[in-house]
Amino acid sequence: QSVLTQPPSVSAAPGQKVTISCSGSSSNIGSNYVSWYRQLPGAAPKLLIYDNDKRPPGTPDRFSGSRSGTSATLGITGLQIGDEAHYYCGTWDTLSAVFGGGTKLTVL
Amino acid sequence: EVQLLESGGDLVQPGGSLRLSCVASGFTFSSYAMNWVRQAPGKGLEWVSGISGSGGHTFYADFVKGRFSLSRDNSKSTLSLQMNSLRAEDTALYYCVKDLRFGVFDHWGQGILVTVSS
């Protein structure tokens, strides 16, 4: 049981937009920045979004992040086949880092 | 280019010990906190432990407190995780992870497999 709650799966067609939610509490998302990570099949996770909505170098502007209260959202526009992956939200909670359970994105 | 190279993974019996190492390059090691994050087969990410850049502060997930010990040698750009009293549920791919700052994991190693089984 993960501290942060994500939908197990989402799907959309190529070119479409998808959002992935991440729900937490006042001790984690409610008081700390949220990051998002993408894990392609067989690869290590990669930082996609940090500080709720900032993109590190290399993250396309098709990816966006937002936070409101105790929830965060990752948005992906112009979906590509190569976006098929697991996506994880993460943040800090008291004295430990926490992750969501992960969301598998399928591009139909 | 940041590189994180893990080593030390192995098959170990329940109750046994193992020491994981991570050699870092491509950045000023002592300036950044470092972490271990694990992923059990077919499961999600689970933070294990973190240590400040100076090594003066360490943090552990509840499920490893008292069993795992994290340390670093800044002169050798090396991170080490001593794992004792290993359990079957510790079986996972262990990633060495660099902090951008606390809680933001900007570079990940390729991972090293730890299998705990009799």
Image: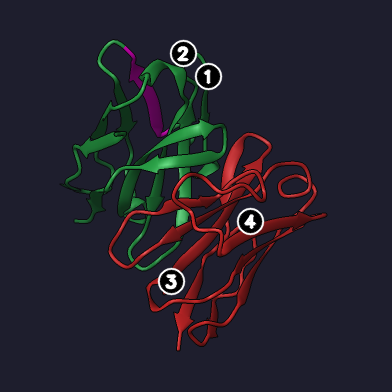
State which quarter of the image contains the C terminus of chain A.
bottom left
Q: Amino acid at mark 2?
A: Ser
Residue A72, x across and y down, in percent? 70, 59
Q: Are marks 3 and 2 on the same chain?
A: no
Nearest to the eye among marks 2 and 4: give it: 2
Q: Name the residue carrying label 1.
A: B57
| Chain coloured green | B
Q: Amino acid at mark 4?
A: Val
Q: Name the residue carrying label 2.
A: B54
Q: Give the SS element for disc 3.
A: helix
Asked if the magenta segment contains residue B115, the reply would be no
What is the distance, in whole Å, between disc 1 and disc 3 at their CAs?
37 Å
Closer-to-camera residue (A52/B13):
A52
Residue B64 at least partly seen? no
Q: Name the residue carrying label 4.
A: A3
Q: Is residue A69 left or right of residue B37?
A: right
What is the distance, in whole Å, between disc 3 and disc 2 at their CAs?
38 Å
Stretch of the chain drawn in magenta: B67-74
